[in-house]
Image (cartoon, grey):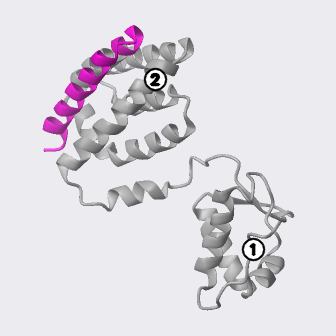
């Protein structure tokens, strides 16, 4: 396939939305690589068969979604990494679902057990040390009446990071945003339970015990369900 073959004329009725979808599809398919510059607005408008205003609007939407960035004097470039300041659209999609408590529990168990089992296989000594430091810091904050919320969220981020799977890391971050509200409650009312649960999960990882980590997460999330989602 020749360079630029992913750019095809589109029906005028579609305008900026289909321009956005077409460029996004080119990025997702790999036809446009991370770090690669897109054609100019004029070239895109000509090849898509739309006005420059439609292209400009599409570029704004893609930038807001974190697909592209503006390089001064050079135009639009496909992002090479996830910008942490970009609001993850997946979070909104998850939040807009019917927040049935049983569905949330089932969903969180499936994701966290999968991530933790992968952590058993792939966690490095540095990953283990980072988890230990996090728990020790959580204990210290609890003793000194400092909020443990950020520590709790970081613990889960460290679990996802320890999978060394970039897809799991991104999904993990989205999930933790979804559950932030319930984590505020659990860390405000039951920080001692948070610490107990994290210690149990950590010990299971340290021992590389699959049955133990599954049991620890099931127990932790069942308690979270009863105390923070009710």
The answer to if 15 sits in the magenta stretch is: no
Residue for point 46% across, 31% down: 160
Side of 94 where 172 appears, left or right = right
Using the image, tell me which numbered label, if any, was put on residue 214.
none
Residue 39, quarter of picture: bottom right
Q: Secondary structure at mark 1?
A: loop
Residue at 22% in and 49% down: 103
Q: Residues within 10 Å of mark 2 (few under 14, many from 20)?
A: many
Total labels: the figure holds: 2
Seen in the picture, residue 226 relative to 128 is either above or below; the reply is below
Q: Position of residue 190 (x, y in %)?
A: 20, 28
Give the image quarter of residue 211. top left
Q: Is residue 110 left or right of residue 62?
A: left
Position of the C terminus by quadrant: top left
Badge 1: residue crowd in 10 Å (few <14, some 14–19, many ≥20):
some
Name which residue lies at 59% across and 86% down: 14
- Magenta-drawn segment: 203-230
Q: Earlier in the sequence, mark 1 or mark 2?
A: 1
In the image, residue 22 above or below residue 90: below
Looking at the image, can residue 98 be seen? yes
The quadrant where residue 221 appears: top left
Q: Residue at x 56, y 54 (%)?
A: 86
Q: Is residue 222 magenta?
A: yes
- Secondary element at tag 2: helix
Residue 7, label in figure:
1
The quarter of the image holding the N terminus is: bottom right
Do we see residue 144 in this rendering? no
Q: Is residue 211 left or right of residue 23?
A: left
Check disc 2 and report the residue beneath it: 119
Q: Main secondary structure of the magenta part?
A: helix
């Amino acid at each position: 396939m020749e360079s630029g073959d992913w750019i095809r004329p589109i029906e005028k009725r579609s305008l900026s939305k289909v321009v956005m979808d077409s460029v996004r599809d080119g990025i997702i398919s790999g036809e446009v690589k991370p770090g690669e510059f897109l054609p100019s607005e004029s070239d895109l408008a000509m090849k898509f068969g739309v006005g420059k205003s439609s292209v400009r609007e599409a570029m704004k939407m893609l930038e807001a979604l974190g697909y592209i960035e503006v390089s001064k004097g050079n135009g639009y470039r496909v992002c090479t990494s996830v910008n942490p300041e970009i609001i993850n659209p997946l979070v909104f999609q998850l939040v807009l679902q019917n927040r049935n408590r049983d569905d949330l529990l089932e969903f969180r168990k499936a994701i966290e057990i999968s991530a933790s089992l992968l952590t058993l296989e792939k966690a490095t000594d540095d990953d283990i040390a980072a988890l230990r430091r996090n728990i020790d810091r959580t204990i210290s904050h609890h003793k000194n009446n400092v909020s443990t919320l950020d520590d709790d969220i970081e613990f889960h981020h460290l679990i996802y990071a320890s999978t060394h799977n970039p897809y799991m890391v991104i999904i993990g971050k989205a999930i933790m945003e979804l559950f932030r509200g319930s984590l505020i409650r659990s860390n405000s009312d039951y920080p001692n339970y948070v610490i107990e649960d994290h210690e149990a999960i950590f010990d299971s990882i340290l021992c590389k015990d699959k049955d133990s980590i599954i049991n620890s997460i099931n127990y932790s999330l069942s308690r979270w369900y009863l105390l923070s989602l009710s």
